[in-house]
Amino acid sequence: MSDTDAGSGPDDDRDAGWFRGLRSEADDADTAHERIAAGEAATPRDWPRLAVDSGFAESASAYYDRLHEATTQATREAVRERERADDKQLIHTVRAMDDCERVANELAERAAEWAGSLFEETDAGLAGARAVAEREPSGDLERRAVSVSARAVDLADERDALSATIERIAPAVAPNLAAMAGPELAARLIALAGGLEPLAKKPSGTVQVLGAEDALFAHLSGRAPSPKHGIIYTHEFVRGTRPADRGSAARALAGKLTLAARVDHYAGEYREQLHADLRDRMEAIGARAEADE
């Protein structure tokens, strides 16, 4: 917004300028950059003179210095907000979720094994850790075992909270990919590719085997057959298809996921036709399976 703009609101507020009610450089910094970012004015006015008359600045030069500071802060906040909702943040979230799940399970097993030597009828896994975490310990050893169990439970709960975050932000980052793959699988595909742009630039054959790098390496080394799919196996369109047709289903899904990633990266808008095409293709594969039976 230029110095011909002002804060939004009634006409008298707009005429007062974005600096209305502000006095010192440290005064209401958040209000200043919010007004700069969202404000507007019906007509240009002599804002430097008005700023001086209002006591906001000592001179026109001082006004422009303050305007530069406020616009820089507004730009900085806008960039920070975009950074919070981009594909890099989605990658951090899904990787943190996986770390929490892995460590929670490992710690829960350790806690259950330890608690089993101290308490009777201790179940294994996170269910056992939750039960132990609710116990009233007696003595230092029991306190430590209960504390370790509580840490495992906390990590498991954090994993669930991170999953909820992915469910919320993935559709904003990649609307078509999240709708087609589901938010969590979309986030994993983006993380495996290193970002939405790298994913959008990959051929569908590569997207098809993302997450199966070990199997692909074994195939290239002559030690195993070529993998038909990677992490997209978790999608119902692949997992729910009969084994003889999973290769076809994986290719069809990978092709549409690749298109979805490209639309998300280059256009950023939801396109229903992509999803309708995938449904039609999967129905054709399903009909072929029924005809063979």
Image (cartoon, rainbow, N blue to C red):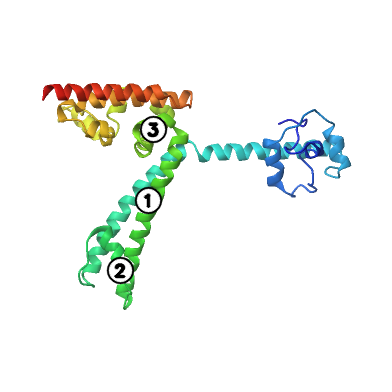
Q: Where is residue 59 in the image (x, y as percent from the top left)?
A: 87, 39
The residue mark sitting in front, 1 or 2, is: 1
Which residue bears the numbered disc 2?
145
Q: Where is residue 113 in the image (x, y as percent from the top left)?
A: 22, 64
Q: Give the Cα separation between the discs numbered 1 and 2.
A: 23 Å
Q: Give the Cα separation between the discs numbered 1 and 3.
A: 20 Å
The residue mark sitting in front, 2 or 3, is: 3
Q: Quadrant of residue 121?
A: bottom left
Q: Give the Cα separation between the discs numbered 2 and 3.
A: 43 Å
Q: Quadrant of residue 176?
A: top left
Give the number of marks.
Answer: 3
Task: Report the residue that reaches farthest toward the bottom.
Answer: 139
The residue mark sitting in front, 1 or 3, is: 3
Amino acid of disc 3: Ala
Q: Which of 293 and 7 is in front in this view?
A: 293
Side of 123 where 87 appears, left or right: right
Which residue bears the numbered disc 3?
179
Counting residues from the start of the chain, the first of labels 1 and 3 encountered is: 1
Q: Is residue 108 above or below residue 249?
A: below
Residue contact between numbered discs 1 and 2, judged by CB atoms under 8 Å: no
